[in-house]
Image: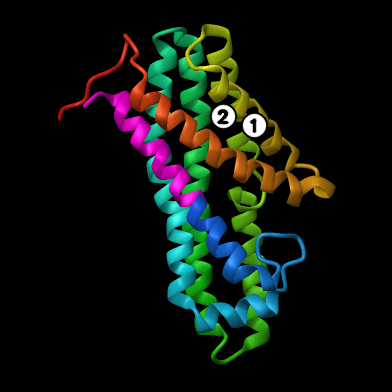
Amino acid sequence: MTMQRIGGLAALACAATYIFGFVLLVTVLADSGYGTSAIDAADTVRFTVENQALMITWNTVIYIVNALALAVLVVALASRLRSKSPDWGSIALAFGLIWTTLVLGAGMVANVTTERVAILALTDFEMAVQTWEILHAVELGLGGGNEIAGGVWILCVSFAGLLHRAFGKIVIALGLFTGIGGLLTILPPLGDVAGAVFGLGAIAWFIAVGLALLFKRDGAATYAPS
């Protein structure tokens, strides 16, 4: 199996983690404002105490599993771009690995937060709320609340693909749209809307990239042991 096809499977896995996260967010977590600037810390702590396993599962899928799949995709896309432009391939690899590291770190912090808050809430609920607010801010800073690193990477891949015809028009257009959405999350008034645009756009982009890597031949594909 080629590295390009492995990367295609990784891209589809990334899309699946985003879909899982959105479904759970909309159906279960939305009532407390989770995922928005209007989140209620006390309600979230109560929910976390009652649903610790669910929260750890959610954090693990949307952050840790996503980061592991993303690392593979980053390498595959960098390899594809290097066949067209070594410099752009290196730039894409650097930004992609930065984003992967931040996502993985956010997931680890989120799971530690869940475990710590669940223990504290049994004896000091107010302290549990304060602890959650502090650690959640760290999680958001790493990547749960802004998508600057992801936006830069997707824009980089898309721009390089446009310059060197490494991808089709759909992949490039979705990437530019999604990347801009990620950059706009730095603006507080646009944070929630831009975050939704980035998340939904990323799902479509991951799927488009995955299908492109799986079914479109690339003469410079790198082979991995089967």
Res. 1 visible in picture: yes
Q: How crowded is mark 2: few (under 14 residues within 10 Å), some or many (20 or more)?
A: many
Q: Which residue is drawn at 56% across and 29% down?
A: 153
Query: Residue 45's quadrant in the figure?
Result: bottom right
Q: Residue at x 53, y 69 (%)?
A: 113
Query: Which residue type does callout 2 highlight?
Result: Trp
Give the CA distance from mark 2 to mark 1: 8 Å
In the rendered image, the residue lying farthest to the bottom is: 123
Q: Give the range drawn in magenta.
A: 1-18
Give x and y (percent) for residue 27.
58, 68
Q: Name the residue under label 1.
A: 179
Q: In which quarter of the image is the C terminus?
A: top left
Secondary structure under tag 1 reads helix
Q: Earlier in the sequence, mark 2 or mark 1?
A: 2
Give x and y (percent) for residue 143.
60, 48
Q: Which residue is drawn at 66% across and 60% down?
A: 35
Asked if disc 2 and disc 1 are in contact, CB closer than 8 Å, the reply is yes
Answer with left or right where residue 216 lies relative to residue 193.
left
Answer with left or right where residue 17 lies relative to residue 44.
left
In the rendered image, the residue lying farthest to the left is: 226
Residue 66 or residue 29, whichever sits in front: 29
Confirm whether the magenta stretch covers residue 206: no
Query: Residue 73's quadrant in the figure?
Result: top left
Give x and y (percent) for residue 181.
70, 37
Q: Quadrant of the N terminus?
A: top left
Q: Name the residue under label 2.
A: 153
Give x and y (percent) for residue 74.
43, 30
Residue 60 or residue 216, whichever sits in front: 216
In the rendered image, the residue lying farthest to the right is: 189
Residue 31 or residue 159, whichever sits in front: 31
User: In the rendering, which numbered label is found on residue 34?
Assistant: none
